[in-house]
Image: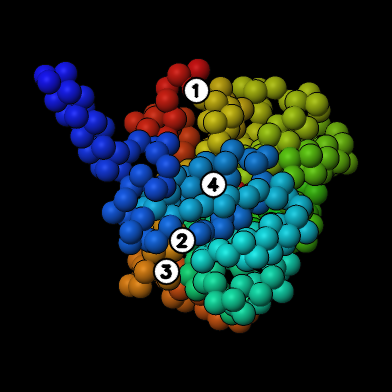
């Protein structure tokens, strides 16, 4: 009898724990009260690529947070293949998605498939990258993309003593993918800070390549950036000029730039240029500690996912999501109500605080 009672009690305890939402890996249906609210609705999450660490974290965070609320999640990566992303979104629509969350590869290429979403009354949320030329987008969760560029520019201004009149320094510029609205915003921020120093001659772009068209990098590709850096080094710096600063808008591009510099005989610690970046990838963080990269921009994907999940809840369950910008993001059809998270510049001085103390990385991962 006692044994029976113990068995019954332990069953009750297990059920109670499961009812409390379970662990991270708990299936969606275990959080019964939330799935009652969310009705097990399906969310299609379309991500661009797994070739960069940040998007893997973005997808994982979104899936976990949505499943905890009782949603069913169809998470897809298109490996930077535009047509593959279109097909994935078409499949999500066919399979009865109730809401789509999209981080696009080419933001102009989704206009038709987003029309289909609209025809099926499926709300769409733009994740990190704005969806252009469509009115089929309800909200946009992102970081302050111009702010990222301003932070990169200010870092250079500050560390190179530009305000104090120091220079001249030789500088080369890299921008992101021309089909990503973020790349344009970021670049505007960089030049807003640095253009006056190009004009004054404290910064000298030896290649003369400063227009967006000249410096952009299709698909933010590391290989493309490496090739362009190699061409610039052999074409403009082979006669003894030292490259002092490289503006890179993404950690992946910074790796390509570093590889080209090493190939041209530059050595870390010996007139190695200041190199910027974005995303606080693990490898970039290690490179910051070793002196290969000077800084990166930390975008806490946990916060972005939180804001985006609130948008999903708002469009599906009613209510207003948190919005803090209703003017900046005009996609040529409408101004998309947005939440802009704050980017944080990270270098050797604050890496411990921002990336380790905040729990984004474990200390051991960086060793
Ligand atoms: C994102 C950046 C990222 C870049 C390359 C941009 O849209 O905002 O965080 O570095 O894409 O993946």
Q: Answer with left or right where residue 31 lies relative to residue 298.
A: left
- Asked if marks 1 and 3 touch (Cβ < 8 Å), the reply is no
- The picture quadrant where one finds residue 319 is bottom left
- The residue to which callout 3 is attached is 316
Q: Earlier in the sequence, mark 3 or mark 2?
A: 2
Answer yes or no: disc 2 within 8 Å of ligand 1: no
Question: What's the mark number on residue 366?
Answer: 1
Extreme bottom residue here?
333
Q: Residue at x 58, y 45 (%)?
A: 55
Q: Secondary structure at mark 4?
A: helix
Q: Residue at x 37, y 33 (%)?
A: 359
Q: Secondary structure at mark 3?
A: helix
- The residue to which callout 2 is attached is 41
Q: Earlier in the sequence, mark 1 or mark 3?
A: 3
Instruction: Judge depth for marks 3 and 2 and give the one in front.
Output: 2
**Residue 120 on image: x %, y %:** 59, 76
Tell me the distance, in whole angstroms, between the alpha carbons under discs 1 and 2: 39 Å
């Amino acid at each position: 009898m006692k044994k029976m009672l113990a068995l019954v009690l332990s069953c009750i305890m297990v059920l109670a724990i499961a009812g409390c939402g379970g662990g991270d890996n708990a299936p969606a249906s275990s959080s019964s009260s939330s799935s009652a609210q969310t009705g097990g609705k399906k969310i299609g999450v379309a991500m661009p690529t797994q070739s960069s660490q940040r998007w893997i974290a973005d997808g994982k965070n979104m899936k976990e947070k949505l499943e905890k609320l009782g949603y069913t999640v169809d998470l897809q990566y298109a490996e930077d293949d535009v047509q593959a992303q279109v097909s994935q979104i078409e499949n999500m629509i066919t399979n009865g998605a109730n809401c789509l969350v999209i981080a696009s590869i080419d933001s102009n290429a989704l206009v038709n498939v987003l029309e289909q979403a609209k025809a099926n009354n499926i709300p769409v949320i733009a994740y990190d990258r704005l969806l252009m030329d469509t009115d089929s987008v309800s909200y946009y969760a992102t970081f302050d993309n111009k702010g990222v560029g301003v932070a990169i520019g200010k870092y250079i201004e500050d560390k190179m003593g530009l305000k104090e009149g120091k220079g001249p320094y030789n500088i080369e510029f890299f921008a992101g993918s021309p089909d990503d609205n973020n790349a344009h915003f970021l670049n505007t921020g960089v030049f807003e800070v640095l253009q006056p120093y190009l004009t004054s001659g404290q910064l000298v772009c030896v290649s003369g390549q400063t227009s967006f068209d000249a410096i952009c990098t299709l698909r933010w590709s590391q290989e493309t950036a490496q090739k362009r850096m190699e061409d610039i080094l052999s074409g403009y710096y082979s006669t003894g000029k030292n490259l002092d600063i490289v503006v890179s808008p993404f950690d992946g591009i910074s790796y390509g730039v570093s590889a080209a510099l090493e190939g041209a005989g530059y050595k870390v610690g010996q007139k190695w240029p200041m190199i910027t970046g974005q995303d606080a990838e693990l490898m970039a963080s290690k490179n910051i500690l070793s002196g290969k990269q000077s800084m990166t921009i930390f975008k806490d994907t946990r916060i972005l996912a939180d804001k985006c999940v609130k948008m999903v809840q708002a469009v599906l369950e009613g209510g207003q999501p948190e919005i803090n910008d209703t003017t900046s993001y005009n996609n040529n059809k409408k101004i998309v109500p947005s939440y802009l998270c704050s980017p944080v510049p990270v270098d050797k001085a604050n890496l411990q605080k921002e990336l380790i103390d905040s729990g984004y990385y474990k200390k051991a991962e960086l060793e």
